[in-house]
Amino acid sequence: MFNLSRITPGWDEVERQTGWKMDWAPGTPLHISQTTSNLSATLALVVFVALPVLLAARKLVTARCHLGDFPGPCWAAYTRLWLCKALASGNSAQIFVDVNKAHGSIARIGPNHLVTSDPDLTRQILAVGSKWRRGPWFDSIRIDPRISNIVSERDPRVHNAMRRRMAPGYAGKDIRGLEEAVDERIGEFISRIEKRWVSGSGLTRSFDIARRIQFFTIDTITHLCFGKPMGFVASDSDKHNFIATIEMQLPIVQHFSVLLFLNTLLRLVSAVPFMRRLVVPSSADKMGIGTIMGLSRQVIDGRMNESEKPKADMLGSFLKRGLSLDQAEMEISITLVAGSDTTATALRATLLSIISTPTVYQRLAREIAAAEAEHRISTPIRNEEAQKLPYLQAVIREGLRRFPPITQLREREAPPEGFQLPDGRHIPGGTFVGLNAWGTQLNPVFGTDAHVFRPERWLPESYDDGGQRLAAMSKVQELIFGHGMTRCLGIPIAMMNLSKMLVEVNFEAGVADHTGLCLCFPKITD
């Protein structure tokens, strides 16, 4: 109750503006009442507008504070759209390099996402016995949402058991005639070039060697897996649209790795039989990954009907060591997808670096020519002979360092108790930390010219410190292949391909089209 006995005239205007009613008599207290309908409407409006604003403000403040010790792009703290945009750009590797350069070796790229280019932190995360676990990112690289594979398995015990079974096959120990198979595929590749794209006097022929290198790596891996190539080089074509399918699907997979609800949705959809046929590759498919699964199934079925011993190829190794038929089919498929692409990327990037750096090309050519003249190498070159060519190995190491073939974040999840950094900052439990392979390989240990392709940095004679600098650089460069129990199992085969291919493809080359990375090969002379 309010005593308004001393209010002066003019209340009519207040009543008109506010809707308040006055019930009073002269000389008595004045009672003010607001109409129920107006009051309810006002309160409802306040709640409807203010509550969402308050909740949104609280969410923004919480998001900002959650990883507040880690700077990064402004909007990355509030939404994963910044990360999605980076992945969709097709240039995410360089974007993450720029982020770490601008905001430090551990930077924020999402509400619950960090990216690091710190080699020491990377080693701690990947170390044997580490409490860090593979995050949901790895679910996105399952070919079948219901079946894990050696690349996607998140349970450390299961993953380690899978590695033990498959290591002999991936490393080539169970593959009879491994080096001869690689030589055969390289020979076919070189022969194809000589017959179709050799340039002569007054005639220049150019072709897309980048695509043909993909054909070579696919044929090589299928030869090692099944004992015979798929015939990409022979047909000079993307058989079954395999490469086209991979190139179409990989950008989609990257978004599944960030928008995690899509993985959940895919698992639910794939559980419905008629929907499963639409979203999951099958061995019955005539195009894409399914054709590889179909080839695997065909070979597996054929071998199950044979009474002879398992074949000495990668598939035979997997079956001999206890993989189920379905698991073997899945592992062969992921091996072809992951192995062929990374090896092709390393070959293409290194070859381009060689031919676009005349001093490197000339020095490498001199080393190979001298080794041939002194009969230190065979034709085709043996892997053990290639390992003894110091400049060739320096070129390979520098090519891998400057252009790491893996650009994905491969996020790990911080342990529940979090992780304390040497500088005192704390990474909260459950935070996803991506590994910036490109940024790591620009570490100051490589010198002020880390952004330059310079193989000489790997030669012992470049330093007089007893090998300390080389050891420090090697420790960082080796992270390209992972670390600890996640270190790549296929390193021996990949390095053999690089060493042999870069020697055998030893002819004058010029860049015909810098934009398309097409190379022109003049006539080969004896």
Image (tube, helix red, strand yellow):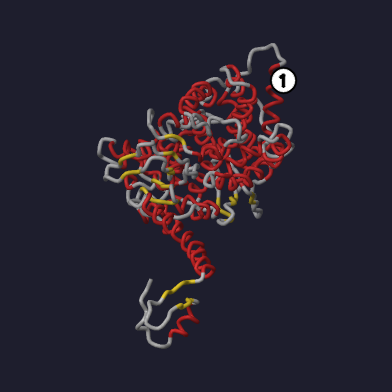
Question: How many numbered marks does the figure carry?
Answer: 1
Comparing 101 with 202, the one in front is 101
x, y percent for residue 219: 64, 34
Residue at the image position 34 percent from the left and 39 percent from the top: 419
Query: Which sits in the foreground, 159 or 2?
Result: 2
Question: Taking 241 as reference, is 36 left or right?
Answer: left
Q: Residue furthest bottom?
A: 9
Type of amino acid at the residue the image marks with label 1 = Gly
Please identify the residue farthest to the top as the structure is shown.
307
Q: For the C terminus, give its image quadrant.
A: top right
Say which quarter of the image contains residue 322: top right
Q: Position of residue 454 (x, y in %)?
A: 40, 47
Check disc 1: other Cα within 10 Å, few if <14, some if 14-19, many if 20+: few
Image check: 315 left or right of 114? right
Residue at the image point whose x is 69% and y is 24% from the top: 299
Q: Position of residue 245 (x, y in %)?
A: 66, 43
Q: Quadrant of the N terminus?
A: bottom left
Q: Is residue 315 above or below residue 42?
A: above
Q: Which residue is mark 1?
A: 302
Q: Is residue 190 something that shows in the picture?
A: no
Q: Residue 206, position in %: x, y?
A: 63, 51
Judge whether residue 135 can be spotted in this image. Answer: yes
Q: Secondary structure at mark 1?
A: helix
Residue in the image at 39% along x and 56% along y: 61
129 relative to 512 in the view: left or right: left
